[in-house]
Amino acid sequence: MKSTIKDVARLAGVSFKTVSRVINNEQTVKEESRSKVWKAIKQLDYQPNLSARHLRGAPSSIALIYDNPNSNYIIEMQQGILDQCREKRFELVIHPCDSSSPDIVKELTQIVFHSGVGGLVLTPPLSEMPHVVAKLEEENIKHVRIVSGSSSPDDSSLCVYVDDRAAAHRITQHLVEQGHRKIAFFGGDSAHASSEKRLTGYKEALQANDLEIDEDLILPGHYSFESGAERARHLIDNGKLPTAIFGCNDDIAAGAMFYAQNNGVNVPEQLAIAGFEDNPFSRHTWPRLTTSRQNNNAIAQRAAELLIAEICPGRYDINVMADNGFEPQLVVRDSTAQQASPK
């Protein structure tokens, strides 16, 4: 038989009303009693009725907020958050949106006030938009941001951060060590800080190796297969073929590879190509893409863990001030295997 709220109360030595107040995160309960209740809940594996909690106004769900055309990124983020939600007995609301909408702040606040979610996991570019973060703070809406950087950009809210700059430096260094001197950079959407950070890492690696930064080989664009193919077309058709391309994500790199190979350019013999993220594109191309493995599942799990701990203070024993940083790791595959002759 499943444990009941009265079983929890009996084991904790408190009234069932006290148990209810603890589950609903009411602040009137003394810390000693709160600790006893959560200990009893864990011991009995008691599962509160989520629908009843919702009717009483207690949060039982969180929302994933995103504006990203990369379906693999979203699926991995969603799975990571779901893993935490299932463990903590929360529900997950998935909310795609347009970050450029003039009503985006209103849209986000309405999700909380109308859907009753306890908080938001914000992904880029929304997580990196100061006016969005400021409004959530003003409305006291709990949230955790996933951002690009080597540390939290500010103290306004909890962040999980990804060191794109260091990872991009490592990819570029790998290409340099392969003998490449003319390395093109295909950027992602400018609204995403990751594109800027990866460009910075690329430039720093070139400078560290006393290589010239050729602005003609730095092509802005979007995080898409089509964008990668279009920029490869621009270089190849105009006779500006480099010896290597660093695509800001695997979709871009796969698009560049597709256009190159369909126009007589062999990869990696004539052109080495590297991507970023280690999504399925990197493993399904031929040759397989060298890339930087970004563990989106683990990143999302940590963000959800932090958010649920914010929503239910004292319920879960986690260190919210622990290192919440992730650094993607270089994965060398066939697309950069051929060593170029130094130019």
Image (cartoon, rainbow, N blue to C red):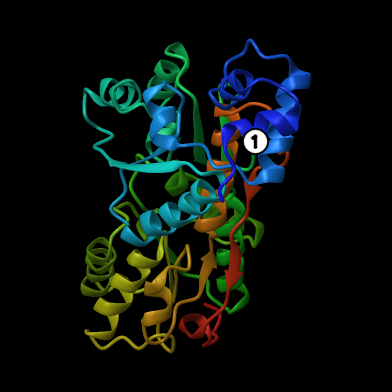
Q: Position of residue 44 (x, y in %)?
A: 67, 44
Question: Residue lying furthest right in this view?
Answer: 32
| Viewer-closest of 226 and 70 | 70
Residue in the picture at 45% in, 20% down: 141
Location of residue 218 (image quadrant): bottom left
Residue in the picture at 26% in, 88% down: 264
| Viewer-closest of 31 and 136 | 31
Count how many numbered circles sit on residues in the image.
1
Residue located beneath label 1 in the image: 7
Q: Is residue 197 left or right of residue 110?
A: right
Q: Position of residue 157 (x, y in %)?
A: 56, 25
In the displayed structure, 269 sits above or below 163; it is below
| Viewer-closest of 34 and 106 | 34
Mark 1 neighbour class, 10 Å CA radius: few under 14, some 14 to 19, many 20 or more:
some
Look at the image and tell me whether residue 5 can be seen: yes
Location of residue 16 (image quadrant): top right
Q: Position of residue 247 (x, y in %)?
A: 40, 64
Label 1 residue SS: helix
Q: Is residue 90 left or right of residue 96?
A: right
Q: Is residue 19 left or right of residue 92?
A: right
In the displayed structure, 54 sits above or below 319; it is above
The amino acid pointed to by label 1 is Asp
Q: Is residue 343 left or right of residue 262?
A: right
Look at the image and tell me whether residue 315 can be seen: no
In the displayed structure, 220 sits above or below 111; it is below
| Viewer-closest of 91 and 171 | 91
Residue in the picture at 46% in, 69% down: 182
Q: Position of residue 22 (x, y in %)?
A: 61, 23
Residue in the picture at 42% in, 74% down: 282
